[in-house]
């Protein structure tokens, strides 16, 4: 049964990737947008911490769990685990207990009333990539929530593969590169993940070009690191930072940069 579900998610992810690639290839120029969901489009951190506490209890975790404010200050639950030394095995065991239940029953609010319009007007919205767990129930609930409750048009959703630990971010970069291929057109990830931003900057530095870009969403999990100077976005490496009010202007700057590089 588990193997069948894993196979199904892999096929669904492959189909979603194919649909994004086709959409991207049909674009005349400019850039495609791929967006994260949790803590970027919708505010889930409070519910996330609540479910982590429940999962820790179910997993028999004996350590001291962080408060909501500690989670925010660290940049999210995964960042907290990295910074404060919770082992990857402990973290994965806790998250296995809660991820599907949390994301199937989620009723999170948009961070900004213009989020949907901003993403659709910013460029070509190709779809979503999310670290939500790879299960059929999670995928169905996520797609239903995006379209029926939040008001997005139907777009493909790629879930984190079951073989990939939550703390790993390289799979998102691999997904973006697979969508882009060798096209000179741009691709932009909107995501609140600091670790993904670091990895994309390193990827672009190694590639010697702006292969992919990220707008780091200035939300409750990233503002502390930005305000303290612990993380400084480097636009020369394709990393921008913006809240939803600032996002249209950043999209305009990226559009101008893409126009210069594609002509």
Image (cartoon, rainbow, N blue to C red):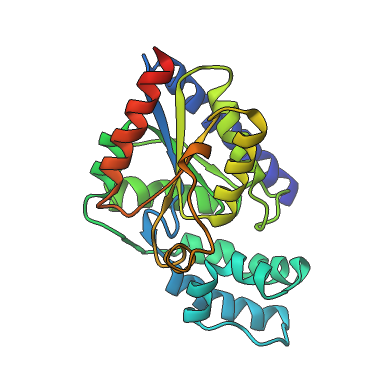
Which residue is painted at 51% across and 48% down in the image? 139
Where residue 120 appears, as percent x and y from the top left, is 28, 36
How many tags in the picture?
A: 0
Q: Position of residue 30 (x, y in %)?
A: 37, 22
- Is 54 placed above or below 76 here? below
Q: Is residue 213 left or right of residue 260?
A: right
**Foreground of the two, 228 or 36:** 228
Position of residue 27 relative to residue 43, above or below, is: above
Closest to the observer, 220 or 105: 220
Q: Is residue 155 left or right of residue 102?
A: left
**203 is higher (above) or lower (below) than 258:** below
The percent position of residue 226, horizontal first and vertical second, equals: 45, 62
Residue pictured at 36% horizontal, 64% vertical: 107
Q: Is residue 120 above or below residue 241?
A: above
Which is nearer the eye, 27 or 226?
A: 226
Residue 1 appears in the rendering: no
Q: Position of residue 4 (x, y in %)?
A: 70, 44
Corner quadrant of residue 35: top left
Front residue of 21/143: it is 21
Q: Can residue 243 be seen in the rendering of this structure?
A: yes
Quadrant assignment for the C terminus: top left
Query: Image quadrant of residue 223?
Result: bottom left
Residue placed at 55% from the left, 33% from the top? 176
């Amino acid at each position: 049964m588990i193997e069948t579900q894993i196979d199904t998610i892999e096929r669904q992810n492959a189909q979603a990737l194919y649909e994004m690639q086709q959409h991207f290839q049909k674009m005349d120029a400019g850039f495609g947008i791929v967006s994260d969901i949790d803590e970027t489009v919708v505010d889930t951190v409070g519910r996330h911490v609540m479910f982590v506490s429940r999962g820790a209890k179910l997993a028999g975790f004996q350590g001291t769990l962080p408060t909501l404010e500690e989670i925010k200050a660290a940049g999210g639950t995964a960042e907290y685990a990295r910074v404060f030394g919770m082992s990857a095995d402990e973290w994965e065991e806790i998250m296995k207990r809660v991820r599907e239940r949390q994301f199937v029953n989620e009723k999170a609010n948009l961070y900004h009333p213009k989020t949907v319009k901003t993403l659709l007007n910013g460029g070509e919205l190709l779809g979503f990539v999310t670290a939500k767990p790879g299960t059929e129930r999670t995928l169905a609930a996520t797609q239903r929530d995006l379209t029926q409750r939040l008001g997005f048009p139907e777009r493909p959703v790629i879930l984190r593969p079951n073989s990939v630990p939550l703390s790993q971010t390289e799979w998102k970069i691999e997904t973006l590169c697979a969508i882009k291929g060798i096209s000179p057109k741009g691709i932009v990830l909107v995501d609140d993940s600091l670790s993904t931003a670091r990895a994309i900057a390193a990827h672009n530095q190694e590639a010697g070009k702006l292969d992919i870009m990220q707008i780091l969403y200035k939300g409750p999990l990233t503002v502390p690191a930005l305000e303290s100077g612990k993380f400084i976005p480097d636009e020369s490496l394709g990393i921008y930072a913006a809240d939803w009010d600032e996002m249209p202007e950043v999209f305009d700057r990226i559009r101008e940069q893409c126009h210069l590089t594609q002509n």
